[in-house]
Image (tube, rainbow, N blue to C red):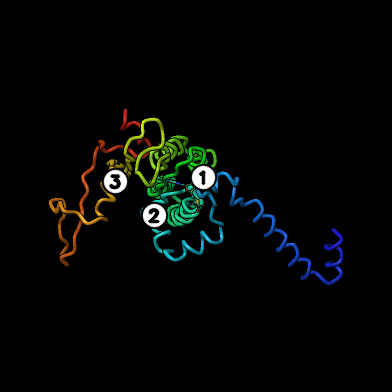
Amino acid sequence: MILKKLMRGFGGNALKHYNEASDKMNSMAQEKQVVSKKRVADHGEVFTGKREVNVMLDLVKQETERIESRFLEPACGTGNFLAEVLERKLHVVETRYGKSQLEYERNAIVALSSLYGIDILEDNVMECRKRLSDIFDQKHTCLFKEKAKQECCHAARYILQKNIIWGDALDLKTADKHNKPIVFSEWSPVNGSMLKRRDFCFSHLLAHGKKTEDRSQLCFSDLGEDVFIPEPVKEYPLTHFLKVADAEK
Ligand SMILES: C[S@@+](CC[C@H](N)C(=O)[O-])C[C@H]1O[C@@H](n2cnc3c(N)ncnc32)[C@H](O)[C@@H]1O
């Protein structure tokens, strides 16, 4: 208070700088990077600050603004990277398709479905899903007000349920009582409003990175490089993007 009064004496600019600095300090305090010493010791849980996240994402800026470009955050915490990528992608969707609700919704679902995460702590997974879902819902409601479709937000929540996985990124298994291999769903838009879902086993996708003796699954590109075409573990019928949850029934 006293400092503020003093600075007012130095003129408007000094006060403006003081206010900016104090806003920055407040937002840094709000942006909690450590929850507890125990979680740091047990799980290395130190969240990345927003500024660092954005500097790193800017290294692949073009990809963060490509609606269908897929991102996996293998120890996603509460989704600091995924949330920023979603904001960037939805901004592009709004700029390009904001005038048509159908086009916006289709592309917003494609943007959301391109984001994947794994975390070993269940509460982080829940928070990450909620955070991405809130970003999606808020943008949608803000754009279309009472015309915003509940169905679209439900579809988004269903996709997040599948894409943000409670699991161990080292042994590639789920961290629940079933302890099953992690499976990721690929969502591909087909003919405008339809989505094709295919499920892939995460360990199969990663096996390509290792030297494999089994060359039977490898194809070659025109340039003679190895091309790996993974086999899905499950395929679903084409489904309208607002009805993705129905394909499982
Ligand atoms: C350093 S924090 C990073 C979180 C987030 N990526 C960020 O940058 O804010 C590490 C995260 O990895 C998670 N984690 C630790 N071991 C893991 C494992 N084996 N598999 C998946 N997640 C793990 C922790 O729960 C924690 O959320």
Q: Residue at x 36, y 55 (%)?
A: 69
The part of the image, by quadrant, that contains residue 39 is top right
Please determine whether, in this image, residue 123 is positioned above or below residue 67.
above
Q: Residue at x 40, y 30 (%)?
A: 177
Do labels 1 and 2 touch, CB within 8 Å? no
Where residue 171 sits: x, y (%)?
A: 35, 44
Outermost residue, top side: 249
- Give SS at disc 3: helix
* Residue 130 seen in render: yes
The part of the image, by quadrant, that contains residue 27 is bottom right
Q: Earlier in the sequence, mark 2 or mark 3?
A: 2
Of badges 2 and 3, nearer the viewer stands 3
Cα distance in 3D space between marks 1 and 2: 36 Å
Cα distance in 3D space between marks 2 and 3: 26 Å
* Residue 144 seen in render: no
Please determine whether, in this image, residue 36 is positioned above or below residue 21.
above
> Mark 1 packing: few (<14 Cα in 10 Å), some, or many (20+)?
few
Which residue is more in the foreground, 243 or 172? 172
- Give SS at disc 1: helix
Label annotation for residue 203: 3
Amino acid on which the number 1 mark rests in the picture: Asp
Label annotation for residue 42: 1
For label 2, the residue is 67
Which residue is more in the foreground, 191 or 117? 117
Do labels 2 and 3 touch, CB within 8 Å? no
Any atom of ligand 1 within 8 Å of the CB at mark 3? no
